Structures are given as structure tokens and as C-alpha cells.
Amino acid sequence: MSDDNAAASNTDAPDATDASASLAAWKQLLTRLAEAGETICSPTGARTPQERAEGFRYLTRLVGAGLDMHLEQADPARPFFTDMLTPTRKFLGDNPDTRYDYVPLDGSHAYRVWGNRDDSVYLALCVYGKKPDGNPNIGGNLSDVDMHFESDGSFEVFLSAEKPAGAKNWLQLNSETTSMVVRKYFMEPTKTTVANIQIKALDEAAPLAPYTEEELAKRLGTVGNFVADTSSMAAALSVFAALNSVTGDATEEYVALQVVDGEMKAGETKSAQELAASIDPKIIAAHLPTPDIQYAGAWWKIRDGEAVVVEGKPPKARYWSVQIFNRWLESPDYRHLPVSLNHGQVELEPDGSFRILISNENPGVSNWIDASGYQEGQVCCRALIAEEPLEVKFRVAKLSELFPAS
């Protein structure tokens, strides 16, 4: 081989340093995934074979979401929305009635978002950021209450540090801005055709550069952190909730946990108040709350022949619903099971109150949520743009006592 050919061959060969940098980034991702796997099997994680199986399935869902959100569509200069939660990809307390569109943002850019409200009962854009101490926060929220829509339901929203002249809808960005989630709630999502929401950066992006080792390492690192941190937070919140369970042995009704304006509030019993006070606020903030939604919930345990009884006064709200989650804050398979009821599906009592039953046996009532084979789990009542606090109680009762034989 001539010297010239040898030089050309060496020029074309992959750089050993670059190759090792890629491998190091890949190994670091695998390390974080292994840590997430340890969370599933840790003392605060799964306690049964079913919870372990669902836990590792949950990790695959987080990996899929992480790759879309933080690797493939992670460039805030060239943003694309990711359909964050779907019937087969669930985390952070998904709602079967809601579409969640996630997009990364950078406060140094300006953006235009446009779309159509369709027949949604609620539409909002919520911007999230990261404080200097690294904790997440809500940077701004714009709901349909304050939005301008055209006669056909279309809209456009500008996102920027300064409000553009003539902008009818605007959300302010700053140096802490990291992302945004667009929420659309529907009364009958399976019967709704949803128009995609679009986004475009208004300032011209630099020419697309070749992919680099540094970019790969950064994005893989974000994916690994997302999977490990999200799984750890879900396990932690479930542990806190389970410390104050609704069981058939309880002697009172109560609300164990409440979230208002994105912050944990105390429940009505001393144990619930102590529980709320002990939860790290960043666990709640990291679950991407929005100030428009109130939550009230509890951890429940039932035996055969028992049901969780959810009773309360319908809130004056744009939307409210009751649903269940497993240990990993995932809804059961709502494609095949009735795991939630919204206010359009709930039949009220003669006095205007509601009563919803959660059980593994169908008692033959309209307001029934299938416990989906679980003996324990989480129940959540949420209300959007509520004019008053949620008034809801949870208890466990025997079906034979609720429906005595004639």
C-alpha cells in the first residue's frame, strides 16, 4: 500500500476517541436504566409479581417517551410536539379524557403555536421551567378562558420574552423556560377527531449541523435522567399515599391527599395532614401540574366482595372526573375497561350528590369503575377551573351492605 493510500485510509477511519465518547454516553444511559430497574424492585417499589411486571412495562413506556421527547424531538430551535401520553404510554397520572402534547422550549427563542380547539371541553397551554436550584416550576399558563378564538375555533398563541405587537394570545418565556404541555380535555375522546397543534420558532435557526458526540451524550443523559427520576418519583408518591389508605377496617371517611394550584394541601385527618406536610414539593412539581386543576385522592385497599365508595358534591367546574391508577400512576387499560367516569357520564343522586363504586365485581349500577383486578391502588378526583373546593369522601364498604338481598 502506498503512503498516499495509507493516509487516505486513516482519514476515513472512525476516530477512536469519538467512538469511546459515544460508548461512554451509551453506557451511562444503561446505568441510569439499571438504576430505574432497581427502583422497581426496591423496598419502596413493587411488592407483588404483578406490580413488578407492570413496573418494568412502565419503564419501557418511559424509555419510549424519553426517546421521543428528549432525543428525537428535543431541539427547541426546531420544535415538534410529542404526543406524550397515549393508551399504551402512561405516566404522571394520565387521564383517558385528555390529549397531552409536549414540546421543548428555550426562553431565548420566540414561537408561534396554532391549531383548533375542536370540541374540547378545556384547552390550555402550560409552560414549565427549571429554577436555579434545579427544581421544576410552572412558568405560565394560558387556558381557553383567556384566549381569543376565531369563529371556526382556530387560534394562534405567541410565546416570547416580550409580547409581539398585535398578538391576541401570548405567553411569556424567560431564561428558566424548558418546555410546554398543551392539554385538551374531551367528554367523549374516542368519538372525537383531534386536529394536531403546530409550533414554529419565529427566529431563524442556524443551519442544521452534523450530529455530534456532545449532542448525543447530552440527549442520552437527559433520557436516562428522565426515566430514572420519573420512576423514582412515582414510587415515592405511591409510598406516601399508601401510608394513609382507605380500607374496609377504617372507621371514617376522608380525603387523603389534595393538590391545589400545583401544590400539595393537607387532607382532613391528622394522618393525612402529616402525610401532606412530609411530601417533598418537588415530587408534585415534577408531575407537571397545572394551576387550573384541583385534585383529591386516596390509596385504597379492598377485599373480595368490597368496593371503594366515592361520594361527594359535584363541583362547579368546567370538567370533573373520578378515575383509578396503579402503583406507577398509570390508568388501567381504558380501551377495554371502564376505569374512569367524567361528569357527563355520572348519574347524580336525587339530592344532587354523586356516588361512584370501584370494585372487581360489577354491582349493576351506572356509576361503576372496574377495579381491573387490583386489590389496591389509587383513586383520583380532578376538577378543572373549579369555582369551589372539591368536596369528596372515600370509604370502603361491603357490597352486601350496599345492596342487601331483598
Image (spheres, grey):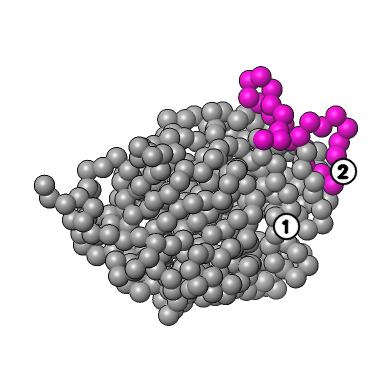
Q: Secondary structure at mark 2?
A: loop
Magenta part of the protein: which range?
145-169
Placement of 232 over or under 210, stated as above or below = below
Residue 83 belongs to the span the image colors magenta: no
Taking the spot 41% from the left edge, 64% from the top edge, the residue there is 299
* Label of residue 162 in the image: 2
Element under disc 1: strand
The image shows residue 197, relative to residue 299, as above or below, that is: above
Farthest left residue in view: 406
For this orientation, the residue located farthest to the bottom is 43
How many neighbours does mark 2 have within 10 angstroms: few (below 14), some (14-19), or many (20 or more)?
A: few
Instruction: Between residue 77 and residue 344, name the one nearer to us.
Output: 344
- The image shows residue 4 at horizontal and vertical percentages of 76, 64
Left or right: 135 with respect to 321? Answer: right
Task: Examine the rendering and report whether any part of residue 206 can be seen.
Answer: no
Could you tell me which residue is drawn at 82 percent across and 57 percent down?
A: 175
Instruction: Give the mark, 1 or 2, whose residue is nearer the N terminus.
Output: 1
Q: Is residue 386 left or right of residue 309?
A: right
Residue type for callout 2: Glu
Q: Nearer the viewer, residue 231 or 24?
A: 231
Q: Which residue is labeled 1 in the image?
A: 129
Mark-to-mark CA distance, 1 and 2: 17 Å
Amino acid type indicated by mark 1:
Gly
Dominant secondary-structure state across the stretch colored magenta? loop
Quarter of the image with the N terminus in it: bottom right
- Rendered residue at 67%/35% (across/down): 145
Q: In the rendered structure, does residue 157 fall within the stretch colored magenta?
A: yes
- Residue 184 quadrant: top right
